[in-house]
Amino acid sequence: MAGKTRSRRSAALGSIAFSLTPITVALLVPWLLTGYESGDGLWWPLRAAGLLLFLPGLYVISHAFWRFVVEGFGTPLPAAPPQRLVVGGFYRYVRNPMYVAILAMVLGQTLMLVRPVLLVYAAIVWGIVGSYVRWREEPVLLRRFGADYDRYRHAVPAWIPRLHPWHPG
């Protein structure tokens, strides 16, 4: 148990350090692009819809990092990957909950601030992330976890969450 505790501790520290990446993408860059100043035509239902995308995104990202620590004994950081395939929590609904949450947060800010520049930014982020996942992350996971990842990949969609959780078995 001491080894697992040590692994969890180092995984937690690594995840905390790596959390600067989604914070930068989802919060810092939108702030740099907009100064968090509202555009014209701010309408409260639009702002409320944006908040409904933004707030759950914060929770999903935090939860996904936690899953890497407690379930995978690792981090989302490619240099310190999980020792076990992470398929619990939100990963039972969508393979990329962190990336989906980051995009939801940026789109939420687009609606809250009515700033089209954030919509363009979200499209750029999705293009980069989607390419990275398809051409780098998925092949690495397939080599590392083999049939387990292949089974998971075929059962759980990459970007649009399932309505019901996947049950590995």
Image (cartoon, rainbow, N blue to C red):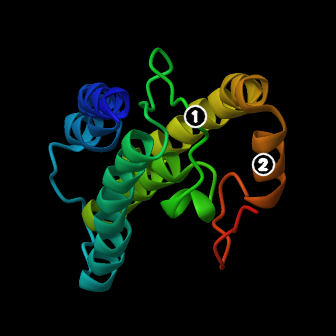
Residue 91 seen anywhere in this rendered image of the structure: yes
Instruction: Say which of 65 and 96 sits in front.
Output: 65
Say what secondary structure mark 2 lies in. helix
Name the residue tied to disc 1. Answer: 129
Residue 89, above or below 43: above
Tell me: residue 62, above or below residue 136: below
34 or 135, which is in the foreground? 135
Q: Is residue 46 above or below residue 160?
A: below
Q: Which of the 4 image quadrants contains residue 83?
A: top right
Left or right position of 73 against 87: left
Disc 2 target residue: 153
Q: Which residue is at 27% across, 38% downward?
A: 23
Mark 1: which secondary structure? helix
Farthest residue toward the bottom? 45
Q: For mark 2, does the 10 Å Cα neighbourhood hold few (<14), some (14 to 19), or many (20 or more) residues?
A: some
Q: Give the x, y percent position of residue 155.
A: 80, 59
Q: Amino acid at mark 1?
A: Val
- Quadrant into which the C terminus falls: bottom right
The x, y position of residue 97, in whole percent, is 52, 53
- Tag on residue 27? none
Which percent across, then down, holds residue 163?
65, 79
Q: Residue 99, image x and y in percent?
A: 50, 45
Residue 52 occupies quadrant? bottom left
Q: If you read the primary sequence from the N terminus, does the residue marked by circle 2 or circle 1 appear first?
A: 1
Return the residue nearer the eye: 10 or 93.
10
- The kind of residue tagged 2 is Arg
- The answer for how far apart the CA atoms under marks 2 and 1 are is 17 Å
Asked whether residue 109 is in view, the answer is: no
Q: Quadrant of the N terminus?
A: top left
**Alpha-carbon neighbours of circle 1 within 10 Å: few (<14), some, or many (≥20)?**
some
